[in-house]
Image (cartoon, grey):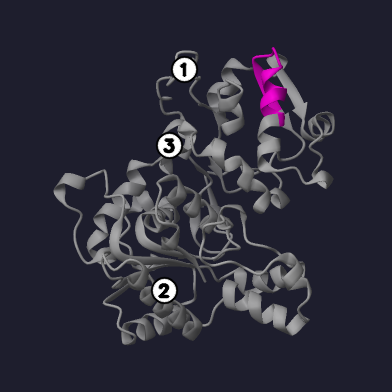
Amino acid sequence: MEIAYLSNRAYAFQPYLWDINTQNSTVIDVVDGVTLRSAIIPLNAFISGPAAGGAMPNPIGPNESKRPRAVSWKWFAEVCPDERRKYVDVRTVRKQRGIEEDRKPSGKEILEAWTAELGDMTESCVVVTDDHVWTFDAFGERMLPAWPTLRHSPILTHFQWSPLVKGIVERNMLLIAGRKAPEAEAGALSPTISGVVAIHLRRGDFLEHCKNLAGWRTMYNSWNTFDGFRDRFPSRVEVGRMDNETRLRLYMEHCLPTVQQMVDRLKAVRSEWIEGHPEADALKRVYVMTNAEAAYRSELSEKLRADGWDGVTMSVDLEVRKAETEVVLTADMMIGQLAEVFVGNGFSSLTSNINLLRMMHGVSTDSIRFL
């Protein structure tokens, strides 16, 4: 959406589609193979603000004009029938603008090239086709040069979670933090859930995927690579010098830790936090956003409590109403954003997006850690 904003165009946002080819109203969950899910979920069920059609802020400078609001794809299809549309081939633009993937352009270069491309067009209805503007490979350290632009964008500065998501977090605050959300904060939670460390512990598909990452020598995902972060993953050169066994052991510890590794990691994070921030509340409770199997969750909870944590809450423990079931993962992200300390999986885009929001709100980089 940032490219549309910079080129003074309205972004057409789509709903979340579990299966783009289905005509059914429900689909089978791809993870457990049993649960029925809505085939189409409106974007506004997850987020609010300019990215989901909310109002753009008023211009700051005298030479700025108010940018157009984002619109739904349904509305775009109505006002921009096929005969009005200009189709733009991604690969052609890359070649013409000198941002071919084999050159490994930075996020800043991609932003600037596409802003210029769309800004030069006179057609009012534009559809980008054939490939993604942002490739998977671009979501490494190449994204960081775009941060100075993104951090001032209303897409981020005015980003909000949906009322549905906020309701989940607010109603479960007693479970998460050991205290209820104060009445004054209803619908607008405190910027920080003090005393809570949230961890992103992805398992499920990562049981195999982490091994693949080691084989590919993958680096941390984009917004997990800010210079100020305390935890740094070895460079691609350093990883390349390791023998296969050493490299696999490194990746598994940081991508798929054992229960004991996780207990030890959180113990170290708790100690280092109070040493570096003696004025802050001690970390006493753990929130675990995870898709881990029941046996792993049970053992982890038991050992964390034995290690002195006052409370351990996991994703499956949240009280979720029927209307909220489709967005509960988004509540995990909001808790990760608001927790006093967040310990994420550096290879995960979910962790990366949480860290983007935390950095947007100016949290201490010491409060962003990794497995």
Q: What is the CA distance from the residue labelled 2 to the residue labelled 1?
A: 44 Å
- The residue beneath circle 3 is 157
Which residue sits furthest left? 183
Q: Is residue 235 above or below residue 361?
A: below
What amino acid type should be assigned to the residue bearing mark 3? Thr
Q: Earlier in the sequence, mark 1 or mark 3?
A: 1
| Residue 66, numbered circle | 1
Identify the residue at horizontal 62%, vertical 74% (top origin).
Answer: 207
Counting residues from the start of the chain, the first of labels 2 and 3 encountered is 3
* Residue 84 sits in quarter: top right
Crowding at mark 3 (Cα within 10 Å: few <14, some 14-19, many 20+): some
Q: How far apart in space, not on screen, are marks 1 and 3 (Cα)? A: 15 Å
Q: Earlier in the sequence, mark 2 or mark 1?
A: 1
**In the image, is residue 371 above or below residue 68?**
below
Mark seen at residue 205:
none
For the residue marked with disc 1, what is the amino acid?
Lys
Name the amino acid type tagged 2: Val
Q: Is residue 114 magenta?
A: yes
The secondary structure type at the circle numbered 3 is: helix
Please name whichever residue, 184 or 82, is drawn nearer the observer in this view of the structure.
Answer: 184
**Is 157 placed left or right of 132 in the picture?**
left
**What's the magenta region?**
113-127
Q: Is residue 323 above or below residue 130?
A: below
Q: Is residue 313 left or right of residue 359?
A: left
The residue singled out by tag 2 in the image is: 269
Task: State left or right for residue 268 relative to residue 97.
Answer: left
Circle 2 packing at 10 Å, graded few (<14), some (14-19), many (20+), is many
Visible residue check, residue 46: yes
